Amino acid sequence: MIGISKLYCGTVEPSDALRYGRKSGEMPSHLLQFSADKKPVVVWNVTRRCNLRCIHCYAHAKDKEFENELTLEEGKQLLDDLSEFGCPVVLFSGGEPLMHPHLIELTSYAVEKGMRAVISTNGTLITREIARDLKAIGLSYVGISLDGMEEIHDRFRGFKGAFKGALEGVENAQNEGIKVGLRFTINRINYREIPAIFDLIEEREIPRACFYHLVYAGRGSKLMKEDLNHEETRKVVDLIIDRTAELHAKGKPKEILTVDNHADGPYVYLRLLKEDPRRAEEVLELLQMNEGNSSGRGIGCVSWDGEVHADQFWRHYSFGNVRERPFSEIWTDLSNPLMRKLKEKKKYVKGRCSECKWLDICAGNFRVRAEAATGDLWAPDPACYLTDQEIGLG
């Protein structure tokens, strides 16, 4: 996760993170990526059921009941363990988490246990009543997926009316005073919609937007051929930077992030090195604190059936099940060779990644994407768009 507004627009400085001793349990949410202990943010896919049919769904979600989902009591036991382990955030996802019959009770329980509760949703089920309930329990944030304007979004989501439903969900959440952000997955089908997304967050006063680079997992594996090439990716990242800076200059700052491609960090630094060298040095310090991709370390995933994964895209490999062992025990068990290597993945990456001068601030980028594209999880990430010269090989 690369905070474009934090880095490029200077809304965060290294001293902000150092003020809290870089301890995740004491840091506000917007600084968590700079923590030193990297206590995991846990994505909990509480259900596989979903009311939409998104073409890039990593969970292969469907609108039907699935067997073997964690019970309410098992879910609370999981949250007890995550709280005791020091996990700062639980992100409730799916499928569509609002289709889970006990979502309100579970998110409320997470808050009671001292964790930040966040929901990742398609937004179509956020009625006025649901929004009031979410506000009442102290929900920190709701991220609503929007992959373009109406025609493109409805096509992406496999459901006519998904766009209007998502915007109604945004409005209902905002009316209750819940912080809302948009989530956009970049690919060749929709990348021309990005300017319209910026227009939308300005017009509707939406404070946050996350732009996700495509990961080849689940139904998203079929979109591999729709991923942007390197030159297109550079142009998109420049566009995101430029539009973020424009809003900042207009006195309408937004929190803008890119996700799932840590090449964005060095790219922002290299651009600032030409434009504002003093700020560039501060950005480099923040990127060193961020440490790059954190799958298996600073981010983890628990599936609807209790299986534990390195992140929400890595469902083909489980480290264990929380029905048999607590998450905290599974997460710290270095007898598992993959878990051990993910804790220090920089030692194991191959090819240009192993020789890259940005390895310490990228950590080899996204391993699951490298595996999907090459069959070797330690191979270079094919989505890295930095040139050999930019990474110190040319």
Image (cartoon, rainbow, N blue to C red):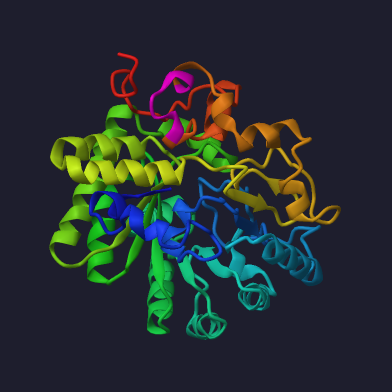
Q: Residue 339 at what x, y percent from top left?
A: 69, 37
Residue at x 32% of width, y 69% of height: 206
Say above or below: 348 vs 206: above
Q: Residue 135 at what x, y percent from top left?
A: 50, 82
Taken as a whole, is the magenta stretch helix, strand or loop?
A: helix
Considering depth in this image, is 333 or 379 the residue closer to the camera?
Answer: 333
Give the side of residue 204 with respect to residue 82, left or right.
Answer: left
In the image, farthest residue toward the top = 394
Give the side of residue 275 with respect to residue 290, left or right.
Answer: left
Residue at x 24% of width, y 56% of height: 196
Question: In the picture, residue 108 is in which quadrant?
Answer: bottom right
Give the side of residue 208 with respect to residue 39, left or right.
Answer: left
Question: In the picture, residue 309 is in which quadrant?
Answer: top right
Say above or below: 62 vs 139: above
Give the side of residue 187 with respect to residue 222, left or right.
Answer: left
Residue 263: say if magenta.
Answer: no
Magenta stretch bounds:
353-360
Considering depth in this image, is 74 or 30 the residue closer to the camera?
Answer: 30
Question: In the picture, residue 169 is in which quadrant?
Answer: bottom left
User: Is residue 33 visible in the rendered structure shown here?
Assistant: yes
Say above or below: 304 vs 225: below
